Amino acid sequence: QVQLVESGGGLVQPGGSLRLSCAASRSIFSINTMGWYRQAPGKERDLVASITSGGTRNYAVSVKGRFTISRDNGRNTVYLQMNSLKPEDTAVYYCMATYYLNNYWGQGTQVTVSS
């Protein structure tokens, strides 16, 4: 079992930045992959970025060059640094962990990009 708690969402103007955090209830050394997904109203939940235990990163085309995923093994936390935010980035952002072939999800944090 893995519990995930996200934080860091909020309201930001276009062009602004936010950093999301995802704290895990166990050591992330043993977690194969951690990632961030997002879901806008009326749309499916899509992958934003992921990072493996070996440090391999993967990004959605729409966020490449603007978002950065990182992990702090000592704090059991994964981060999503979001820069140059656009209104179309508005969504609920969810943290996900793949642990022994099971996927675990956080409760989500709202990100709203609006002037």
Image (cartoon, rainbow, N blue to C red):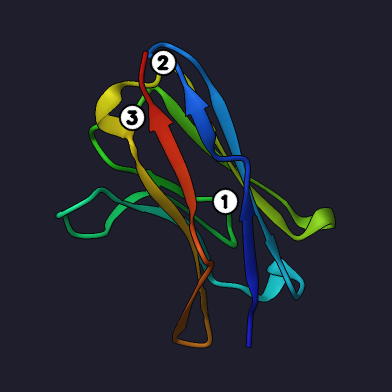
Q: As rendered, which of 114 and 77 lies closer to the eye?
A: 114
**Camera sees residue 82:** no
Q: Is residue 75 left or right of residue 57?
A: right
Q: Earlier in the sequence, mark 3 or mark 2?
A: 3
From what the image shows, is residue 19 above or below residue 17?
Answer: below
Q: Disc 1, disc 2: CB below 8 Å?
A: no
Instruction: Residue at 65%, 63% (x, y): give it.
Output: 5
SS of the residue under disc 3:
loop
Which amino acid type corresponds to the residue marked 2 in the rendered image?
Ser
Viewer-nearest of discs 3 and 2: 2
- Give the residue pinned by disc 2: 84
Viewer-nearest of discs 1 and 2: 2
Residue 11, position as x, y percentages in the image: 49, 28
SS of the residue under disc 1:
loop
From what the image shows, is residue 42 above or below residue 17?
Answer: below
Q: Residues within 10 Å of mark 2 (few under 14, many from 20)?
A: some
Residue 107, position as x, y percentages in the image: 52, 66
Which amino acid type corresponds to the residue marked 1 in the rendered image?
Gly
- Give the residue pinned by disc 3: 64
Q: Earlier in the sequence, mark 3 or mark 1?
A: 1
Residue 55 is labelled as 1
Q: Disc 3, disc 1: CB below 8 Å?
A: no
SS of the residue under disc 2:
loop
State which quadrant residue 22 falls in: bottom right
Q: Earlier in the sequence, mark 1 or mark 2?
A: 1
